[in-house]
Structures are given as C-alpha cells and as structure tokens.
Image (spheres, coloured by chain):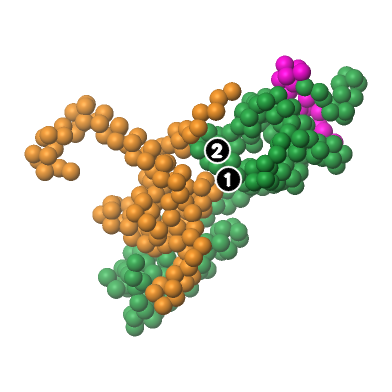
Chain colours: A orange, B green
Amino acid sequence: MSTDFPDLKHFLPLTPAAFNILLALADGEKHGYAIMQAIALRTAGEVRMGPGTLYGLIKRMLANGWIEELDERPDPALDDERRRYYRLSDLGQRVATAEAERLARLVAAARQQGLLPTKGRAILLGSP
Amino acid sequence: MRPISASPASRSHALILSDRVYRRLLVAYPAEFRQRYGPEMAQVFRTSCRASYHASGAGGVVRLWLPTLWDWAWTAVRERFSVLFRRSMMNDTVSFDRQVGDLVWSMVTGLRAAYSLPQVIEAISLNAPEPTASAFKRLHADLTSGLPLEQGLANLLKAVPSKHLAQVVAVIQEQRKAGGNLAELLAPLVDGILKQVPSDGAFYPAMRQEAEVLGAPLPERVQSQKQGE
C-alpha cells in the first residue's frame, strides 16, 4: 500500500477556463467580475467566460479545495457588499504550478521539434 | 477593483430589460446552484451589461447576449446533469448503508493491525464490494492528490449522504482533534450500525482474504453468517 502524497497528476490537465481562473487568482483575492476581467485582459479578449461557466467552475474548485471564499465582506462604502471574494488555497496554488510546469514542458518539446524559435532566436526576434 | 458606478445610461431600457431577462433565465439552473450563485451571476451579468453599454451602447449589450445565451444553455444543462448524477449516488446510498457496518469493522481491523488510515482507505478502495469501493476510490484519489483528509471526507459525505457514514466521519474528525486510538473509537459503532441496517453480506467475502491475512477477529454477526455458510 502506498502513501505517496501528494500526487497532483490526478487533476491534470486542467481545462483552459479552470487554469485561467487559477491564474487570475494567483495575484490576490477577487470577486467574480474581477476574475472575468482579469482573464479577458490577460488573454487579450481571446477567452471570454460567461457567468454560468465562471460560477460552475468556482463551485467545483471550492469543492476540490483549490479556492476559498473569504469570510470578510468589503466595506459597503468601497464596494458592493453582496459580492463574494475568492482566493487561491495552498492546494490550488500547487495545482496551478503543476499545470504551468506541464504546459512549459509541452512548449519546450514544441521548441525542440522546431515548431517554435529557440530561446536565443526568440529574444533576437523580440518574442517573449 | 473599482466598481462601475451607476450612470444615467444604466437606467436605459436595454439594461433594465437585460437584467430582468437574465434573472428569469436563472430558473433553468438547479435550485441549490441558483440559490447559492444566482445573485452573484446576475450581478456579474449586470456589470458586464453596463460595461458593454458604456463602451458600445445598446449594440454592445446585444453582442454580449449572444455568448451569454450559449453559456446559459450549456451550463444549465451541465448543472442539471450534475444533480441527476448526485441523485443516482443517493440511490447508491441505500446499498452503501447495507455495507457500512462491515466497512467500519474492516477499518477497525486494519487499524488494529497497525495500518495507517490512508492505507486502510486504499485497501478498502481495492477490495471492498460496490458501491463502497467506488466511493473509497474517489476518497483515496482525493487524498493522494494532496487534499486534506477533512476535505476528502466532506467530499465523500457529499457523494454518499449516509447518516451512518456521517457518524464514522464525525468520529474520525473528533479523533484528529482530540487524539486517541481510532480503532477503539470506531469499534463501538459496528454493532449499533449492523443492528439498524443489516449487512448485505457482500463485504465479508470481498474482504475475507485481507481479514484472514491479518488474523482479524470477525464481529459476531459476520461469524454467525460464516457458520451458516
């Protein structure tokens, strides 16, 4: 019987929408609309998430323990007190990192196969 | 993030109508989901409408509606299916309850034989009959993925809403807070549960090999069942 903890492979790969939500929360707590805006901004409008997709994923991420809902509500003078704020949990942080590493390995493989310019060439060409 | 303040534009007919229609559409979601997330979803949509209106006028609101309708239709169906799936798990709960007494006995046996709780959970996931095996496979997968035991047990209870399982989970959680020998804390539950819900007899044949390897004593009910074979 094994007790190999933790094995995050069970969760991977994440859907692009789930990974984008974790990325949006990586720099701090946000409410639903702020998460949607952060994703639209980060992906230059390529990924636009509707409220159904967003809250369906939030529900599953809360159940998986990847994100947490903040107990404290914002000051009604500064923000709408009906808004709920979410933040990344330790487990969510590890899941996001594991997915980022998985994607980085894929990009490295694509580079090795000549599908992407090599790093030096990418810098010369001004690519990120 | 600074909220988008209400302006005269927000009172426009397009915005009021959009808000009203979207709140009506939320009825398509299952009640539990709607009650928990509906107000937030409506608020997010309202804010998105205002932003689109400020950027592009009523045309922007119309363009926002197209992907929103697709999102609504697809996710409402998905959430409904998720409720149906959970209901089928509820039916499994009746079968699960008829294995809980034997399940607790197996846990006690494993713990007395100096296995850790994660090891006992894994053994049950591998050897127990259905539906216990599937429920414990998921619990084991949760734990090996790094989910804390408390959260894994909470997920198990959500999937299998059995009051007898809830008793077991409460004992485990209490033991983790207050300490003590978990096997001896769980052992008194066995007879009580078996008296309330007779065993379906599927557990003992499935776990017999493990029990014999451990030289584990069988509870009276199972022993009499064995003698009757």
Identified at 64% across, 46% down, the residue is B177
Name the secondary structure under disc 2: helix
Of A122 and B30, the residue lying toward us: A122
Give amino acid for label 1: Gln
Q: Main secondary structure of the magenta part?
A: helix
Question: Chain letter of disc 2?
Answer: B
Does B30 sit left or right of A14 as displayed? right
Of A83 and B21, the residue lying toward us: A83
Q: Which residue is mark 2?
A: B142
Question: Chain letter of disc 1?
Answer: B
Name the secondary structure under disc 1: helix
The first of marks 2 and 1 along the sequence is: 2
Does A38 sit left or right of B23 as displayed? left
The quarter of the displayed image where residue A49 is located:
bottom left
The quarter of the displayed image where residue B222 is located:
top right
Give amino acid for label 2: Asp
Q: CA distance from mark 2 to mark 1?
A: 9 Å
Does the rendering let one see residue B141? yes
Of B163 and B90, the residue lying toward us: B163
Q: Which residues are magenta?
A: B197-215
- Look at the picture and state if B68 lies above or below B113: below
Residue found at the very far bottom of the displayed protein: B8
Q: Which residue is mark 1?
A: B151
Identified at 28% across, 52% down, the residue is A43
